Amino acid sequence: MEFSEEKTILTRNGYDEIQRELNEILTVKRPALVDRIREARQLGDLSENFDYHDAKHIQAMMEARIKELKAIIAHATVVEAPANDGSVGIGSKVVVKDLEDGMEDEYTIVGPAESSPSEGKISNESAVGNALLGQTVGGVVSIRTPGGAFRFEVLSVQ
């Protein structure tokens, strides 16, 4: 994932998680990997040393992740808390009901850098997230996505 120079919106929790991940990589994972590379070098011929090549590959991916996390932090705009006016904003937990099948879902509206649909965290820039912004309990939104059209009723906003 590449990040531009524009601000990255994060919730306080998302910012803290990114800080924790970066700290763990820098203080635990990176030093352990350096030790692994050192030990693999001592085994001799590097041209056929799988452990050495594997560790170097992991090191390259880790360094890329460090760069990505630092860029996110450097350009972060932290949204401390959603507006307490009952409307959906970044950081809000929203329970919606699909008006077609009656299924209920809970979403947390977050910035793109911390979205994880499998965890119920959807980006404010996604079709669903964007449509829910500003809605209040009882509001109905119609959303067109590549997967089809949906109508949701907002059941609760926290």
Image: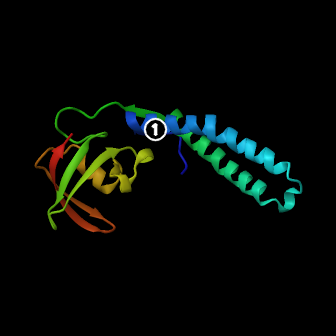
| Residue labelled with disc 1 | 17
- Tell me the SS state at disc 1: helix
Q: Amino acid at mark 1?
A: Glu
Q: What is the x, y in percent for residue 34?
A: 73, 42
Residue 7 in sight here:
no
Which one is nearer the viewer's eye here, 143 or 22? Answer: 22
User: Which residue, as the protein is rendered here, is positioned at the far left?
Assistant: 138
Q: What is the x, y in percent for residue 108?
A: 30, 46
Q: What is the x, y in percent for residue 4?
A: 53, 44
Q: How many marks?
A: 1
Reply above or below: 150 against 63: below
Which one is nearer the viewer's eye here, 151 or 56? Answer: 56
Reply above or below: 13 against 127: above
Left or right: residue 64 versus residue 46 is left
| Among the 4 quarters of the image, the one containing residue 90 | top left
Left or right: residue 144 versus residue 137 is right
Residue occupying image coordinates x 40% and y 32%: 78
Check the picture and name the quadrant holding the C terminus. Answer: top left
Residue occupying image coordinates x 19% and y 40%: 87
Residue occupying image coordinates x 34% and y 51%: 122
Which one is nearer the viewer's eye here, 23 or 44? Answer: 44
Residue occupying image coordinates x 22% and y 64%: 150
Q: What is the x, y in percent for residue 135?
A: 18, 45
Residue 34 in sight here:
yes
Which one is nearer the viewer's eye here, 111 or 58? Answer: 58
Left or right: residue 131 versus residue 52 is left
Q: Dot 1, how many residues are within 10 Å of its Cα: few (below 14), some (14-19), or many (20+)?
A: few
